[in-house]
Image (cartoon, grey):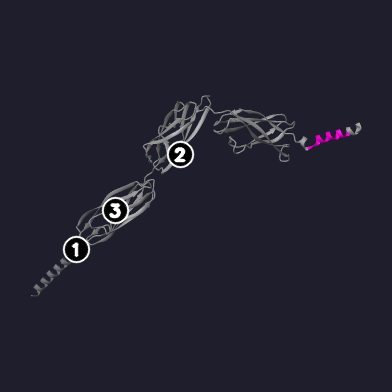
């Protein structure tokens, strides 16, 4: 049987080993002291304040927390999962707030979310970095009786919105939630190429009961140089639910602006500028697109009576602010009628949606009589000189007799 002295030695050794063992030294430094609110409902999003307490007796530094919930968890953190706290004294608390969203299909129950805490035992970079994972709990309390707004349709009046025009944007809403939406306000964002007509971008709708529908309407003008595009507006809906809690929903609505090409004849050139019987030349048309969209399949037809060697010219595509030239050869027959001729110019083109356009212009040219090989003035001068010579010869012969 052992004596009391050896037993005392063994007891002292065991006690010393417990005090100096790593297990005894690694006491948790932090715990979750409070969570507010403690419960959320499916489909709800709100701020949750989490308080942690320093369980030690000494000050710790560079404290930070990070939520490390599993991807499949119905509890979602909206925004950054890591938050910096700073210094926490021994025995004191610190709080952070996370924006938390609960999936609509979340099961009722208590969920434990891991929260990783980081800290240093000394100020600056010299201190040792520690970390541990603690847990906070949130209770999912069942279906939330809330309003929920849905955009059913978006239409414009007129149906086709064109650059340089004004239009009305009508949006049909329905409350598909369980609760009424009270003090409902609809606000729409506006940016170029649109401008509100009358400066009103917000409409007050009042109460939209569960299952009911309502229209909200805004009036806009479109810049004349707006390009064909699907423009997106952000519709912001603000309202109160049955608990008088403020809610904000943001929806995207689209408006198609359809620009148009516009071709006109900028310049007409006739070379030579004067046409005569039996002459040849060239007829040039400079076409410019002053519209906001590409003109496609551009072609020109010129109708005349016996002046042009061809009557059709294909150009193809003319982008906005660009020009192309159509050329037609001219041949005037020797026996062509002298006088004025009307050239009917037809320009045909389409836009990228297949819509057809045309432009018509009348241009007159004059055909003069074919000029003599010898200028008339030369003929007259020759005749005068001939007559003078003949008269002179006559008088010389008379004097000689």
Residue 347 vs 7, above or below: the answer is below
Q: Of circles 1 and 3, which is in front? A: 3
Residue 400 vs 103, above or below: the answer is below
Residue 325 in the image, given as x and y percentages of width and height? 34, 55
Residue that appears at 29% across and 53% down: 301
For marks 1 and 3, the one nearer the N-term is: 3
The residue singled out by tag 3 in the image is 301
Q: Nearer the viewer, residue 396 or 24?
A: 24
Find numbered disc 2 in the image and state the secondary structure of the residue it sits on: strand
Q: Which quarter of the picture shows residue 22?
A: top right
Q: Check the image and name the residue furthest to the top.
A: 243
Q: Which residues are magenta?
A: 8-21
The residue singled out by tag 1 in the image is 376
The residue singled out by tag 2 in the image is 232
Circles 1 and 2, Cβ within 8 Å, touching? The answer is: no
Q: Which quarter of the picture shows residue 217?
A: top left
Q: Nearer the viewer, residue 51 or 359?
A: 51
Residue 259 in the image, given as x and y percentages of width and height? 38, 43
Q: Which SS type dominates the magenta stretch?
A: helix
Q: Of circles 3 and 2, which is in front? A: 2
398 with respect to 32 (left or right): left
Residue that appears at 48% across and 33% down: 236
Mark 1–mark 3 Cα distance, whole angstroms, equals: 39 Å
Residue 371 in the image, given as x and y percentages of width and height? 21, 62
Q: Check the image and name the residue furthest to the front.
A: 1
302 with respect to 318 (left or right): left
Find numbered disc 1 in the image and state the secondary structure of the residue it sits on: helix
Residue 35 in the image, given as x and y percentages of width and height? 63, 29
Circles 3 and 2, Cβ within 8 Å, touching? The answer is: no
């Amino acid at each position: 049987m052992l004596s009391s002295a050896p037993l005392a030695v063994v007891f002292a050794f065991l006690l010393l080993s417990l005090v100096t063992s790593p297990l005894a030294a690694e006491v948790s430094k932090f715990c979750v002291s409070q969570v507010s609110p403690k419960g959320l409902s499916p489909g709800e999003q709100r701020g949750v304040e989490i308080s942690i307490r320093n369980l030690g007796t000494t000050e710790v530094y560079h404290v930070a927390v990070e939520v490390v919930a599993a991807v499949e968890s119905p509890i979602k953190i909206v925004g950054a999962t890591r938050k910096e706290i700073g210094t926490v004294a021994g025995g004191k608390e610190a709080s952070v707030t996370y924006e938390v969203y609960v999936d609509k299909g979340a099961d009722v129950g208590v969920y434990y979310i891991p929260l990783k805490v980081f800290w240093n035992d000394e100020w600056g970079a010299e201190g040792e970095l520690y970390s541990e994972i603690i847990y906070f709990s949130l209770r999912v309390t069942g279906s939330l009786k809330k309003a929920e707004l849905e955009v059913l349709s978006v239409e414009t009046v007129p149906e086709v919105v064109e650059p340089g025009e004004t239009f009305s944007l009508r949006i049909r809403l329905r409350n598909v939630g369980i609760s009424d939406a009270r003090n409902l306000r609809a606000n729409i964002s506006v940016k170029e190429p649109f401008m509100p007509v009358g400066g009103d971008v917000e409409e007050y709708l009042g109460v939209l009961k569960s299952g009911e529908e309502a229209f909200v309407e805004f009036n806009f003008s479109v810049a004349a140089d707006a390009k064909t595009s699907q423009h997106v507006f952000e519709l912001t809906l603000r309202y109160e639910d049955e608990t008088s809690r403020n809610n904000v929903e943001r929806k995207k609505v689209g408006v198609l602006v359809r620009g148009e090409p516009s071709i006109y004849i900028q310049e007409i050139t006739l070379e030579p500028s004067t046409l005569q019987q039996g002459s040849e030349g060239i007829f040039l048309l400079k076409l410019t697109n002053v519209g906001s969209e590409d003109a496609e399949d551009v072609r020109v037809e010129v109708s005349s009576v016996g002046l042009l060697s061809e009557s059709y010219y294909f150009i193809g595509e003319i982008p906005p602010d660009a020009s192309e030239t159509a050329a037609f050869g001219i041949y005037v027959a020797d026996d062509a009628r002298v006088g004025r001729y009307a050239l009917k110019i037809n320009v045909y083109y389409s836009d990228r949606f297949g819509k057809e356009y045309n432009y018509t212009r009348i241009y007159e040219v004059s055909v003069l009589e074919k000029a003599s090989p010898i200028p008339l003035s030369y003929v007259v001068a020759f005749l005068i000189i001939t007559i003078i010579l003949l008269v002179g010869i006559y008088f010389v012969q008379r004097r000689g007799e």
